[in-house]
Amino acid sequence: MANILIVEDEKNMQDIIAEYMQKGGHTCFTADDGVDALMSLKNNPADLMILDVMMPHLDGFAVCKLAREMSNMPIIILTAKCGEDDKLKGYEYGADDYMTKPFSPRILLAKVTALLRRTSSAPSDSIQAGKITLLPASHKVCLDGQEISLTHTEYELLYFFMVNPGQIFTRDQLLNRIWGYDFEGTTRTVDVHIKNLRQKLGDGGKYIVTLIRSGYKFEVTV
C-alpha cells in the first residue's frame, strides 16, 4: 500500500482516479491545483504522484520540476496534451511516465503498480562502478562518496546499466525494459533521460557510452 498524491483540477476525474487507486489498496491525497500540490507534498510526503498538466495558478510541468527538488518519488503525468514536445518536456522536468486523456483507469493503476514494484523490489548489496556507488536497498546513488538525487526512472536506467556492464542496448530495448511495452512515447525519451542522468553523474556520466546507430552501453573507463 502506498500514499498517492492525485493532482487534478477536474473533480470528477479526481474522484475516478482516487477510486481506482483505492481499489488497488492505496491511500490517496488530492490537490486541486499546483500550489495545493506542493503544499501537500510538504505536509504529507507521497510515494507516487499522478499529475495533470493544465491547471490554474501553476501548471503540471512547473509542479513536476519543483517536486523533483523535494522528492525522487515516481511521477506520472496525466494530461490531454499529447504532442511529442509536451511529453519530452515532462521527462526533462523529471516525470517517469506519461498517459494521455482519455485514458483507462485500469491501465493507470497497472502503471502505478509497476512503478511502485520497481521502487520497492531491490536487492540489498551495493554495486560499485568507478566513482559511482549504487545502494539498491535504499535506492541511493553516491558519486565519490556524496549522495546525488536521481528521479525514479534515472535510477532505474543507471541500475540497469550497472548490472549489465559492457552490453549494448538499443533505445527500443531500453524503452521496453524501463518504461514497459505500453509506454506512450518515442525513443527520444531515452535520450532525454540519459542526458539528464549524465549531467547528474558529472564525470561519472562518461561511463554511459553512446554508440552511433546502435544505442548505449555502460563501461567504466580509466
Image (cartoon, rainbow, N blue to C red):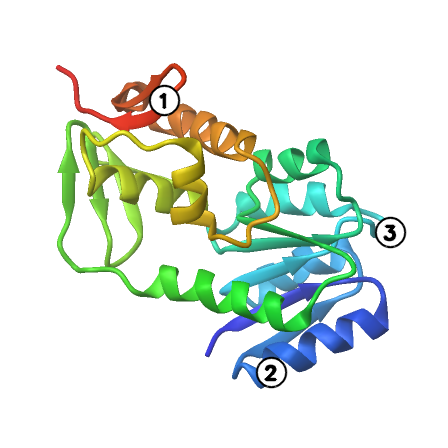
Instruction: Find residue 136 and name its label.
Output: none
Dot 1 or dot 2: first in sequence order is 2
Q: Find residue 12 and report its image quarter.
A: bottom right
Q: Secondary structure at mark 3?
A: loop
Is residue 10 something that shows in the picture? Answer: yes
Residue linked to disc 1? 214
Q: Secondary structure at mark 2?
A: helix
Q: Amino acid at mark 1?
A: Ser
Looking at marks 2 and 3 on the same chain, the residue that comes earlier in the sequence is marked by: 2
Residue in view at x 36 percent, y 44 percent:
155
Q: CA distance from mark 1 to mark 3?
A: 43 Å
Nearest to N terminus: mark 1 or mark 3: 3
The residue singled out by tag 2 in the image is 22
Q: Which residue is mark 3?
A: 56
* Residue 22 to residue 124: above or below: below
The amino acid pointed to by label 3 is Pro
Name which residue lies at 59% across and 85% down: 23
User: How many neighbours does mark 2 have within 10 angstroms: few (below 14), some (14-19), or many (20 or more)?
Assistant: some
Res 93 → quadrant: top right
